[in-house]
Image (cartoon, rainbow, N blue to C red):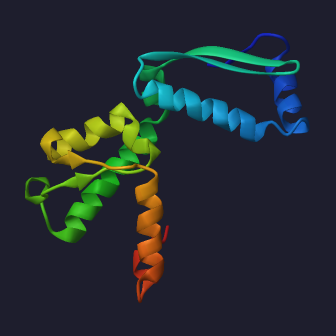
Amino acid sequence: MFTALVRPPKRDFIALVELDLSFSLYRAVSAAKVALSTCDAVEFQFAYGNVDIRSTIARSDFECWIGEDLARLEVTVDQVLSTSKITPREADKVFLTGGSSFVPAVQRLFAERFGNEKLTSADQFESIAYGLALIGQAEDPDQWAVSA
């Protein structure tokens, strides 16, 4: 849990909104998430003016926070396999892309399902843009749309 050191959390929240610091906070949180991909714990710090938010974040806590997302990801993988009518054993390669592919819990999910030897990746961020560009050039880009 985050702890505000200088003022009560409600005042820090108001200051974040009034000073338009949401993007700066987002970047600090993103940096902590990236660090948790290689460290068991990170020291989160966001300081601006009178706002001073600090906390130690353990990877195990982060993985609990994203537990529902991981469960949905697992269900989605099952749906893709079912729709494709293949088993994990029949998959030749599994290409992991995007920032979430760095999260150890995500990597474990795919390794447990497909085997570590089948996992591959490239430039996790550039590959997304390239894939979207290919979809944009497709004759029927709507085939890639997902409805909720």
Q: Residue furthest top?
A: 5
The quarter of the picture where the N terminus appears is top right
Q: Position of residue 49 (x, y in %)?
A: 88, 21
**How many numbered markers are drawn?**
0
Residue closer to the observer: 16 or 1:
16
Residue under the image location 47 percent in, 72 percent down: 133
- Is residue 100 at all visible to an observer of this figure? yes
Residue under the image location 24 percent in, 48 percent down: 120
Name the side, left or right, on which 64 lies relative to 2: left
Looking at the image, residue 75 lies above or below residue 141:
above
Residue closer to the observer: 116 or 7:
116
Name the side, left or right, on which 97 lies relative to 2: left
Looking at the image, residue 125 lies above or below residue 49:
below
Q: Position of residue 71 (x, y in %)?
A: 37, 44
Q: Residue furthest left?
A: 89
Name the side, left or right, on which 25 lies relative to 120: right
**Quarter of the figure with residue 47:** top right
Q: Position of residue 20 (x, y in %)?
A: 85, 40
Residue under the image location 21 percent in, 62 percent down: 81
